[in-house]
Image: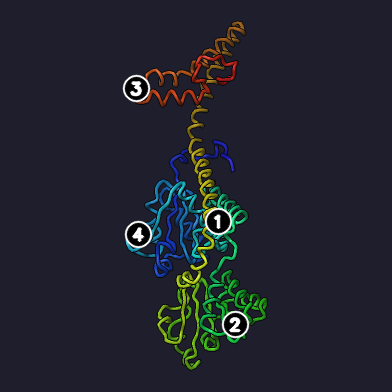
Amino acid sequence: MGIAPCEAIPSDCAFMTIFTLGINHHSAPLKIREQVAFQSETLPQALAALMRVKSVREAAILSTCNRTELYCVAEEAGPLADWLAAHHQLPREALAPFLYTLSSSEVARHAFRVASGLDSMVLGEPQILGQMKDAVRLAEAAGTLGVYLNKLFQQAFSVAKEVRSSTAIGAQTVSMAAAAVQLAESIFESIGEQKVLLIGAGEMIELCATHFAARHPQALTVANRTVERGRALAERFDGNAIRLDDLSETLALYDIVVSCTAAPLPIIGLGLVERAIRARRHRPMFMVDLAVPRDIEAEVGALDDVFLYTVDDLAQVVASGVESRQAAATQAQAIIEGEARQFLNWMEARDMVPLIRKLRDVAERARRHELEHAMKRLAAGDAPERVLEQFSSRLTNKFLHAPTEALQHADAQTRRPLQEAATRLFHLSPENPTDDPADGNLPR
């Protein structure tokens, strides 16, 4: 995407910067991350509110189980932290230790790493790219995505594609779903003898269904608020579906429970699990909570017959596979560094647009003024050759007056930088600054 015509550039764009304010699995534990997560259905309203923050011109929000990040074009980043805390009704000082703020080239490098799976809990996982694309589509639909963020994200998607096609970063990637199966197999001798309950019907649950179905469990059930959507997923794996409201009567039937919904509050409480364990006569139950905020109350993990794991717990399971992908990550980082420099060059070029526009405006006013003067001379009967000669001379003097004055009156500190700038701007030959324009060293 090139630089747009000058008329499309706001006059104050030169003072805008891209910022990322975020919190992720590197900077904060789950109990903090879940407090600042955004629900997908409320994101349009959140984006609208974010755009009302002073100086914010563009905005996008990326919210997943591992991160919440605000991408904004603004004059300063300070108000973003205040907004995030206020939006979630949290004291700013409670969030401050876990937040990170990036700007300019740091934003590009970070966004490219995120899109490529290098900043994920599972190195190289592809799910984050789809989540980032969803965030961009939502911001575009909300009207908060402008030229700068659109360029940033489109280049991030391009970088992610190049990383996947030219490195082995995605080879044998251990996903959260695969990690859940691995943990289950460490507790039960055979998943083929267990009954599996999947709560939700989103992408993560679909991945879990794929991995667990491959182990041919005794039964596979999908529980979802919309039973039709749950049934559509379950039928792909020869399973059945139930309503979310049926959990209180059916939870005790299942040995393995994996939950990942967008519910703002836990849907499985301590009392419900205690009753299920008693009904099961204390046969163990394996539970995985992949949701942020959590679907299963944390207190459930203290029960003797329950093995409860969260997304942070699963990170330890997949950590063993990270070393084998570090070489690919190093190659990917080299690609990202080059692309980040390109993006910064693009940003700097756009920052010059207002200055270039002013320069052209000054030149255009001088041209029109001298043209009017020349036309009056011609109308008065002056010789055209003489009028043209004077026109070109006066126009040249006007164009060169300001830079000549600056060079002549420069002090010792600014003289050399001005000389170098003039040499570069006017294509002067340092060895022979009096070259004739006809030799191509000076602009014609």
- Nearest to N terminus: mark 4 or mark 2: 4
Q: Secondary structure at mark 1?
A: helix
Q: How many labels were placed on the picture?
A: 4
**x and y, in percent, of residue 397 in the image:** 49, 15
- Of the two numbered discs 4 and 2 in the rendering, the one whose residue sits closer to the viewer: 4
Separation (CA) of disc 3 from disc 2? 81 Å
Mark 1 → mark 2, Cα distance in angstroms: 33 Å
Where residue 313 sits: x, y (%)?
45, 73
Quadrant including the N terminus: top right
Q: Is residue 36 above or below residue 16?
A: below
**Front: mark 3 or 2:** 3
Label 3 belongs to which residue?
A: 411
Estimate the spatial distance between the alpha carbons at disc 4 and disc 3, rounded to whole Å: 46 Å
Disc number at residue 242?
A: 2
Residue 96's disc number: 4
* Badge 3 or badge 1: first in the primary sequence: 1
Residue at image location 57% in from the left, 37% down from the top:
5
The image's mark for residue 136 is 1
Quick one: label 2, few (<14), some, or many (20+) residues within 10 Å? many
Give the residue type that dot 3 points to: Asp
Asked which secondary structure carries label 2, the reply is strand
Label 4 environment density (alpha carbons within 10 Å; few <14, some 14–19, many ≥20)? few
- Whether the residues at callouts 4 and 1 have beta carbons within 8 Å, the answer is no
Crowding around mark 1 (Cα neighbors within 10 Å: few <14, some 14 to 19, many 20+) is: many
Residue type at numbered disc 4: Ala
Front residue of 94 and 85 = 94
